[in-house]
Image (cartoon, helix red, strand yellow):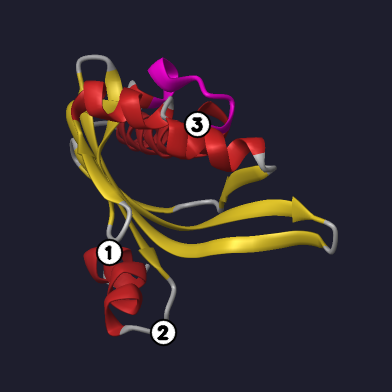
């Protein structure tokens, strides 16, 4: 293989990786606004058909129908009607072929007379799978940041997947 061909192959590989990372970041960034705008269909379609959203102590929803019901349900509507909003940090992403994982923080905040209150601070692990429609969330786990080993393990998982890089 000629040097220029080798460089083109390497460039294509890097471009594909950056494109994947951008798509995974876009999906992560779409979660909060789709949920907070009560766009339940859009929010549910961020997940695979059998995707799981697991929030210990709150609930676990599997598949588009359950996700859609939760994202349009009374519990969420009540929180939003009191000025609550979700915020997710940028994810740290690791890609391995057709699967990927991201780690980020999430905040559930509410405007109050004192300013902005943080109602929930959580660690998130988002697992992705490449489908015929593109990348989708296969599982999202949300753990309250409470000083526990479980939360630290969840936050550190993507580092162990990538040798710390």
Magenta span: 36-43
Q: Left of 53 or right of it: where is 86?
A: right
Magenta span main SS: helix
* Position of residue 71 measured from the top left corner of the image (x, y, whole percent): 41, 29
Question: Is residue 38 a member of the stretch shown in magenta?
Answer: yes
Query: Where is 71 relative to 58, above or below?
Result: above
Mark 2 or mark 1, which is nearer the start of the sequence?
2
Q: Which residue is mark 1?
A: 162
Query: Where is 28 relative to 42, above or below?
Result: below
Alpha-carbon span between mark 3 and mark 1: 30 Å
Alpha-carbon span between mark 3 and mark 2: 27 Å
* Position of residue 25 measured from the top left corner of the image (x, y, whole percent): 47, 39
Of 26 and 68, nearer the camera is: 68
Q: Which residue is mark 2?
A: 147
User: Which quadrant of the structure image shows residue 103?
Assistant: bottom left
Mark 1 or mark 3, which is nearer the start of the sequence?
3
Residues at marks 3 and 1 touching, judged by CB atoms closer than 8 Å: no
Mark 2 surroundings: few (<14), some (14-19) or many (≥20) residues within 10 A: few
* Position of residue 3 measured from the top left corner of the image (x, y, whole percent): 33, 36
- Quadrant where the C terminus lies? bottom left
Residue 13 visible at all: yes
Query: Where is 65 relative to 4, above or below?
Result: above
Q: Which residue is mark 3?
A: 35
User: Which quadrant of the structure image shows residue 19?
Assistant: top left
Question: Is residue 123 a member of the stretch shown in magenta?
Answer: no
Q: Secondary structure at mark 3?
A: helix
Mark 1 surroundings: few (<14), some (14-19) or many (≥20) residues within 10 A: few
Residue 22 visible at all: no
Of 161 and 81, nearer the camera is: 81
């Amino acid at each position: 293989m000629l040097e220029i061909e080798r460089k083109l192959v390497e460039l294509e590989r890097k471009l594909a990786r950056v494109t994947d990372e951008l798509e995974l970041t876009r999906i992560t960034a779409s979660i909060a606004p789709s949920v907070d705008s009560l766009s339940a269909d859009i929010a549910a379609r961020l997940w695979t058909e059998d995707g799981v959203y697991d929030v210990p102590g709150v609930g676990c929803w599997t598949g588009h129908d359950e996700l859609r019901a939760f994202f349009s349900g009374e519990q969420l509507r009540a929180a939003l009607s009191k000025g609550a909003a979700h915020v997710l940090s940028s994810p740290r992403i690791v890609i391995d072929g057709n699967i990927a994982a991201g780690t980020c923080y999430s905040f559930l905040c509410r405007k109050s007379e004192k300013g902005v209150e943080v109602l929930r601070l959580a660690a998130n692990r988002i697992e992705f799978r490449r489908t015929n429609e593109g990348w989708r969330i296969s599982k999202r786990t949300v753990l309250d940041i409470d000083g526990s080993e479980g939360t630290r393990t969840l936050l550190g998982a993507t580092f162990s997947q990538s040798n710390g890089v």
